[in-house]
């Protein structure tokens, strides 16, 4: 392929970075099973993309062709799974707030099918797939980008402003817009994009925090907000991350619980003194050395065999100690440890595996 084709094709889903800070009355609309629906409805399959027999159906931007004479293996296989997942999602919605057991049951079922569908999309682009074809993977991404752009056009024509978009979700705002207005907009977007889109909810307020690398810009997958119906949605911040100690998660969750009562941005900002008090109280416990070490456990996936590490990083030190215990470790496996001295100047061991840790070992106060 020429470089110009690669630049067009190898781009993934479309992302619009959100404006920094707090925003009120923002609605989130989610495309329903976007990628699986594209594969099913657009007949995207390794044997149907750039077939030899058809030249009419075109992939946006890429100009790939898709067969119109035969149904591909992928869409033929996935249609029943997509329909079954939609069925479970409807049952989940019907039981929300009414029957918690049934709600959880259908949520688990739809989530299991979701990951089956995600895997099918990923396998389209897997280089060792026996019947794979990278053009099929690129075609799905191209259709998804086209759908987001169509959603933006429809929304802006109706007077809405797009604040954020990521892969299969859009965040929109219009002064005075009601839930009915957003439902009508979702119907129009679905018609124009060819993929159903639903209103996930309207936020009382939502925060798009600054990037850790640059304080004046945001990142696409970090935000926290409260819907009008009372649920919270969190993505990318510490309380959702697996590599963050429980102590930090507990502190942040306490702050978020306090913020739940805020109905607007002004009320959130008025809570700042109380939020700082929560943070300072937790920091004081850490500095006193009285934090529960079990809440300071860190988890990391190692990228190499223990003996392959040439540096003296935490992962290298801990993985070698685990191996010395007689426990075999392979790349991709997880290690659990507590940092004793990140600098390595005060103690001979930077960290200890959880299995070897004793409470008298303490922890690196400054690092935590």
Image (cartoon, rainbow, N blue to C red):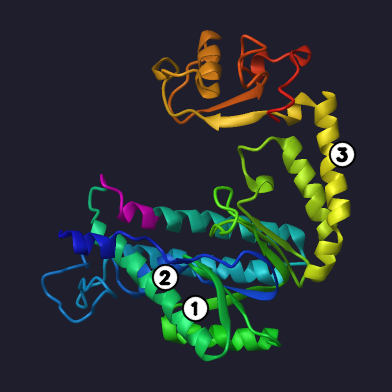
Q: Is residue 356 magenta?
A: no
Give the total number of marks visible in the rendering: 3
> What is the crowding at mark 1: few (fewer than 14 residues within 10 Å), some, or many (at least 20)?
some
Name the residue carrying label 3.
281
User: Contact (CB < 8 A) between labels 1 and 3?
Assistant: no
Picture quarter with the N terminus: bottom left
Quarter of the image for residue 286 reads top right
Q: Is residue 75 visible?
A: no
Nearest to the observer: residue 280 or residue 120: 280
Name the residue carrying label 2.
37
Nearest to the observer: residue 127 or residue 94: 127
Magenta segment boundaries in residue numbering: 120-128
Along the polypeptide, which appears first: circle 2 or circle 1?
2
Callout 3 secondary element: helix
Horizontal and vertical percent position of residue 55: 15, 78
Along the polypeptide, which appears first: circle 1 or circle 3?
1
Horizontal and vertical percent position of residue 3: 19, 59
Residue at point 47%, 20% (across, down): 329
Name the residue carrying label 1.
196
Left or right, 110 with respect to 264, comes to left
The residue mark sitting in front, 2 or 3, is: 3
User: Contact (CB < 8 A) between labels 2 and 1?
Assistant: yes
Along the polypeptide, which appears first: circle 2 or circle 3?
2
Horizontal and vertical percent position of residue 224: 68, 59
Residue 215 vs 339, above or below: the answer is below
Left or right, 297 with respect to 15, comes to right
Residue 218 vs 173, above or below: the answer is above
Callout 2 secondary element: helix
Per the model, the C-alpha gap separating discs 2 and 3 is 49 Å
């Amino acid at each position: 392929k020429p470089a110009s084709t690669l630049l067009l094709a190898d781009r993934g889903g479309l992302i619009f970075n959100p404006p920094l800070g707090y925003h009120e009355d923002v609605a989130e609309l989610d495309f329903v099973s976007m990628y699986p629906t594209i594969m099913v409805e657009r007949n995207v399959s390794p044997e149907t993309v750039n077939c030899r027999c058809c030249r009419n159906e075109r992939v946006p931007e890429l100009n790939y062709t898709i067969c119109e004479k035969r149904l591909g293996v992928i869409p033929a296989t996935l249609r029943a799974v997509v329909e079954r997942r939609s069925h479970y999602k409807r049952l989940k919605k019907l039981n929300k707030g009414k029957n918690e057991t049934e709600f959880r049951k259908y949520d688990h079922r739809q989530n299991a099918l979701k990951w089956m569908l995600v895997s099918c999309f990923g396998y389209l682009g897997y280089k060792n797939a026996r019947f794979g074809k990278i053009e099929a993977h690129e075609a799905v991404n191209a259709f998804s980008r086209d759908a987001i752009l169509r959603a933006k056009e429809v929304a802006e024509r109706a007077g809405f402003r797009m604040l954020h978009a990521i892969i299969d979700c859009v965040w929109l705002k219009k002064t005075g817009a009601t839930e009915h207005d957003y439902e009508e907009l979702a119907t129009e977007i679905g018609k124009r994009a060819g993929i159903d889109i639903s209103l996930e909810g309207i936020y009382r307020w939502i925060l798009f925090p600054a990037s850790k690398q640059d304080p004046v810009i945001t990142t696409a997958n970090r935000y926290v907000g409260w819907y009008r119906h009372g649920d919270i949605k969190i993505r990318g911040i510490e309380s959702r991350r697996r590599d963050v100690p429980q102590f930090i998660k507990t502190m942040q969750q306490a702050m978020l619980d306090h913020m739940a009562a805020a109905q607007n941005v002004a009320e959130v900002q008025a809570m700042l003194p109380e939020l700082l008090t929560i943070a300072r109280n937790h920091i004081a416990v850490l500095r006193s050395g009285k934090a529960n070490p079990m809440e300071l456990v860190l988890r990391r996936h190692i990228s190499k065999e223990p003996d392959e590490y040439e540096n003296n990083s935490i992962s290298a030190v801990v993985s070698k100690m685990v191996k010395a215990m007689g426990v075999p470790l392979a790349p991709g496996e997880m290690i659990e440890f507590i940092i004793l001295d990140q600098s390595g100047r005060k103690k001979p061991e930077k960290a200890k595996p959880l299995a070897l840790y004793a409470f008298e070992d303490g922890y690196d106060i400054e690092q935590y």
